[in-house]
Amino acid sequence: MQKGAPAGTIAVGDINVPRLGFGAMRVTGPGIWGPPRDRSAAIELLRHVVQAGVRFIDTADSYGPFVSEDLIAEALAPYPPDLLIATKGGLERSGPDEWQSNAHPAHLRAACEGSLRRLRLSRIDLYQLHREDPRVPIEESIGALTELQAEGKIRHIGACNVSLEQLRRARSVAPILSVQNRYNLEDRHSEDVLEACTADGTPFIPWHPLGGIESMPRHIATVLSEIAGRHHATGHQVLLAWLLQRSPVMAPIPGTASIAHFDENQQSANVTLTQPDLAALDGLAA
């Protein structure tokens, strides 16, 4: 088993990485806009992530925009040969916490080529459509990515924020080797997509994996606290352990701007929940 992979590894196409990765969205400024308040601390965090054994870093050109990719390259290039950096295209930014879809083929080409420059890569190992654009059939957007793949600029293609029907349509154009949807203890709207990914072995990358833990309803917080206490763990660690045990294709990418919080999240892979624990947490979906 790889260093830093007590929860095991997962295959993204022909690339094997530890299941617990890192989401690099929050190394940017407030509202995922602009540079971080402390650039040197962001660089230190990214280097610490890799030193700790993480081999899957997820980012997007829209994080900043462009800031997260720039920081990753500054901190880590030239990259370890076994480090998988995934990025995304298909969203544009107009301000803090503002996101607009643009998955036109011409935009996706420009976005991918911009990511290649910022990340200092000749090929992106996993390039993901960030979200379907209601103005563009998903088949056309994925088709643009297949052209970039044929040119050697993309190794594998993934899709984010998709329904089962959108995933089926995307797969009519190209193999989709990862799916990244919002999924956590409280938000399981993508349960059917997770089940499909589990059935065919497609890595499922849950974004916002910790949910709104600070504002959870009292009955959920109580169950979480009781389970955490029994395992001498934190609530964050229990939530991530629950995800890791929920499906063998689950590959959480908790993000943070704090080394201490990152280290706490990594320890979730050492928490083994019992069947009664799992049943209690599963029952909170009702």
Image (spheres, rainbow, N blue to C red):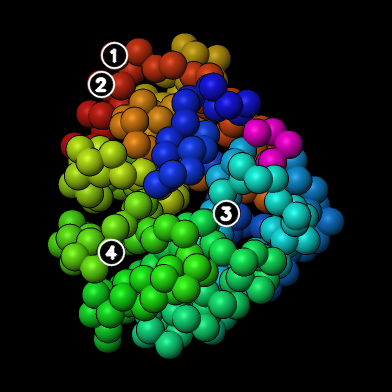
**Label 1 vs label 3: CA separation?**
36 Å
Residue type indicated by callout 3: Ile
**4 and 1 marks in contact (CB < 8 Å):** no
Rendered position, 136 above or below 66: below
**2 and 3 marks in contact (CB < 8 Å):** no
Q: Residue furthest right?
A: 40
Lower position in the chain sequence, tag 4 or tag 3: 3
- Helix, strand or loop at label 3? It is strand
**1 and 2 marks in contact (CB < 8 Å):** yes
Residue type indicated by callout 1: Pro
Magenta segment boundaries in residue numbering: 49-53
- Residue 130 in sight in this render: no
**Label 4 vs label 3: CA separation?**
20 Å
- The quadrant of the rendering that contains the C terminus is top left
**4 and 2 marks in contact (CB < 8 Å):** no
Could you say which disc has been placed on residue 174 in the image?
Answer: 4
Frontmost of labels 4 and 1 is 4
